[in-house]
Image (cartoon, rainbow, N blue to C red):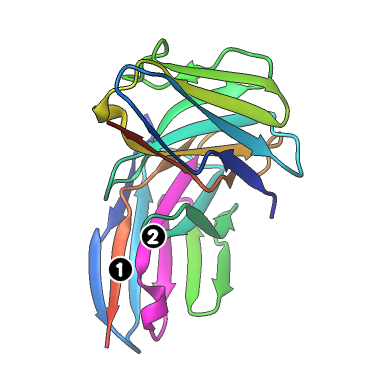
Amino acid sequence: ELKVEQNPLFLSMQEEKNYTIYCNYSTTSDRLYWYRQDPGKSLESLFVLLSNGAVKQEGRLMASLDTKARLSTLHITAAVHDLSATYFCAVESSYDKVIFGPGTSLSVIP
Amino acid sequence: GAVVSQHPSWVICKSGTSVKIECRSLDFQATTMFWYRQFPKQSLMLMATSNEGSKATYEQGVEKDKFLINHASLTLSTLTVTSAHPEDSSFYICSGREGLLEQYFGPGTRLTVT
């Protein structure tokens, strides 16, 4: 059974600092997603990672995938308040269902 | 990216009644649709997977007779919550996928059962 873990679950960081959110999963994955969710809203797609070594960047966010370690990271560079949200990784196995991690609640404080 | 819509965006119903939520893929053919449920401050939990023209596959612990899913066309899936109770109050989110491509999420439906 596919299990997805995230670390940390809660993150309070100061503006302009860097930090990394980790996503571990238990079985072989075909696709890994990162999403952002603001309170009361649906999911905003950030990245889709398909292969080992994949790295994608958008603004202050960069995601990477290591399929051998079954690990993905979401790196935040020089955080700003607008990045405060909950971030989910989600793993798709065998082009089947997608299982979500527990989410990381990020608060960026001045 | 592709667009998925949901209707209604929010609904309030009385305990014991049924409510139907629609999920539509607007610019692609969703051969597979997924239904998720999210309680406050929790993650998304997959409820069921449906392929067009087939019966839905429900996750363990999800009552198929309570949560009726229909995926009669490549652009529409519906979730009917039958005999709703307050504990069914939640944020219901659908997603659609064409073939083996990535999935796209709808905006969600907030259900409140009084």
Crowdedness of circle 2 by 10 Å Cα count: few (<14), some, many (20+)?
many
Q: Which residue is mark 2?
A: A87
Judge if badges 2 and 1 mark residues of a common chain: yes
Separation of residues labelled 2 and 1 (CA atoms): 7 Å
- Tag 2 and tag 1, C-beta contact below 8 Å: yes
Q: Position of residue A12 (x, y in %)?
A: 23, 74
Q: Residue at x 35, y 15 (%)?
A: B83
Q: Is residue A9 left or right of residue A92?
A: left
Name the image quarter holding residue B18: top left
For the residue pair A74 and B52, the one nearer the viewer reads as B52
Q: Which residue is mark 1?
A: A106
Classify B37 as above or below A20.
Answer: above
Q: Position of residue B28 (x, y in %)?
A: 75, 41
Classify A110 as above or below A10.
Answer: below
Q: Position of residue A100 (x, y in %)?
A: 40, 44
| Host chain of mark 1 | A
Q: Residue at x 39, y 86 (%)?
A: A78
